[in-house]
Structures are given as C-alpha cells and as structure tokens.
Amino acid sequence: MPQENPTRISTQDYFTEGKTPPVYRMKVNPRFSPIDMNLQFVFKEGWSHADRLRFHTDAKFKSNNAHPLSDLIISLEPHLLIRRYDAEEDSFVSINIGLDGEIELLANDRDFAQRYLHGLLLECPPSFHSTEDLDITEEWVDKSQTCAMFLGLLQGALEWDPMQQIPPAIQTSLEEAEKALSIANYRSCVVMCRRTVEALLKFAIPRLLHCAPVDNKGKALRLDAMIERFKQQNPSLIPAHLLHVLDSIRIIGNVPGAHADEIKSYRFSKRDAEFALVSVHYFLEQYFSKIDTEVSKYYTLTIDLTEKT
C-alpha cells in the first residue's frame, strides 16, 4: 500500500527487492494555450547525459510481446517527453505533454516535481502564467502500469554512467567567479576559482587514479594533497606545468582568500582575479581536451581582458 502522504522516496527503493514504493503523479490541465517553456530555467537547472527532451510520434511498429512494456508503449499517444534526473538530490521527474495539452508528471520527489513544473512552464515570458491558471490533481499511486512506466524511465536515466558527467559544482563555481569579477568583488572571484579546481580534482582522482579523494584514514584530501597525489605519479597523468598552474591558483586563493588569515594592507586587485580566472579556464580546457578526453562536455569561460583597470 502507498505510504501516507510521503514527500520523497529514494530512487534506489524502486530497485530494492521486496519493496513496492508508490510513484508521485501529478496531472495538470492548463487553462491557456499555447504552452510556453522556459529554456533558461532548463539551462540553469542543468542538463546531463541522463536527461531527455524528445517528441514521440504515432507508433508505426508492431508490439514486441517479449517486452513487458511493449503493449503500454505502443498504445501511447503522440507527446513531448521531458526527463530530468538530479543525481545530487537523488530526484527524478518525467513530464509528458500530450497533443491535447494535458500534462502528466511522474516523480519520486513531490517538491522537486512541483518546482520543476513551475520553473519550466510558469512565470516566464511572454505570458507569465501562474498556478492559478492550472487545474491540478496529485497523488501517490501504486498502480502496476504507472509504476512500470516510471521504473522504465528511471532505469533509462540511471544507466548513464555518472562518471561521464561533470559535477555541477565546477560550473556553479565558475559562474560565481565570473559574476564576482563583474561586480569588482575580487576576493570572492579568486576564492571561487580555487573552489573550481578543488571540485575538478575531486572529479579527476576517481577517473584517473581509480580511488577516492581521501587519505588513509578516510578523511577528504585538501587541495594541496590532491595536487601532490598527481605530482607523485610516474608516468605523469597531468603534466607538471599544468600542476604548477593549479598550485598558483591554490596559493593565490589561500591567503587572504579561502583562509581567514590576513596580510596587513593586502587587497586583491582586478589583475589578481583575472589571473585566477584565466588560469582556471586554461587548465579546464587542457584537462578536458587532452587529458580526460572521454568526457564529452566541458565548460569554457570567456574573459574580457581588454578593459583597462
């Protein structure tokens, strides 16, 4: 039986033998047309290999009776599917928009589903609709057909190797560094640059060294220790000159940046921040284009160095 008013269920519970967790389902009928989608929201939320934006046309193939979902899939009407999996929050939502405008959401996380629906379809130009323009029904269901469809969508998302996905912390830190530079908050810019390379090395160690970024006591490695790990490799996995770039970002970000110690009369300048950003950008480009080339997506940051101080 479904839990009484659950808020969220772990995705792993859906694959645990002996458990039959319900699925959160929301049905939405907009009282307006057309339905606008906020792609800026999708961009800010992030998009990975596991996510999908696809249109399903009329099925032109025969049912494969060997597959348990074949009859269900072939009976689906044409629709737009949006699938989003947030690995950090362990939240998954599937949004089905039919040709008649009816919307169905399936999720393991009620709050995540509601927030994603709002960000995707509401309060965006040109119409700026609100929830008052929607007829909504919601419930946690344990119907076999609904749960089977949800499980198939979730399995499709989880099958993508998370090792091929760049951590959002890298992109977020870069964006914060750029924003800090634009408003002349040079200390914050440098600190976020340091945070970016720390997030990258936490990503790189399992991929290149095949171990967790922790010491022999299980404690998370600091940035200097992670750099030292790569310096000790023979043959080198990251060239020495790139490790020196990392060290320069670490040092400039340490004092008086990431740590509370102060140097009397020292103030970060615009050039300090620009140097840190350029160095981060250079290292990311080199890492993803020459060292870890199996990752198909990497982030770039354009910095205008022509502006005079």
Image (cartoon, helix red, strand yellow):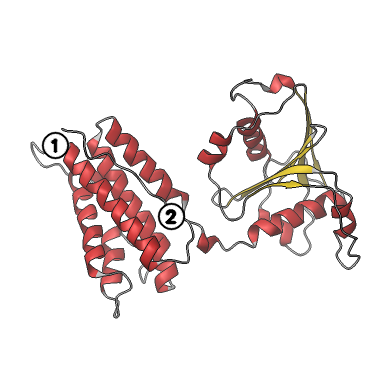
The residue pinned by badge 1 equals 267
What's the amino acid at mark 1? Arg
What's the amino acid at mark 2? Tyr
Q: Quadrant of residue 82?
A: top right
Q: Position of residue 125 (x, y in %)?
A: 59, 23
Whether residue 219 is visible to the viewer of this picture, yes or no, is no
203 lies left or right of 164: left
Look at the picture and state if 91 lies above or below 205: above
Q: Disc 2 on helix, strand or loop?
A: loop
Residues at marks 1 and 2, CA–CA distance in whole angstroms: 32 Å
The tag on residue 202 is none
202 lies left or right of 137: left
Among all residues in the image, which is located at the extreme front?
60
Q: Quadrant of residue 181?
A: top left
First reached walking from the N terminus: tag 1 or tag 2: 1
The residue pinned by badge 2 equals 298
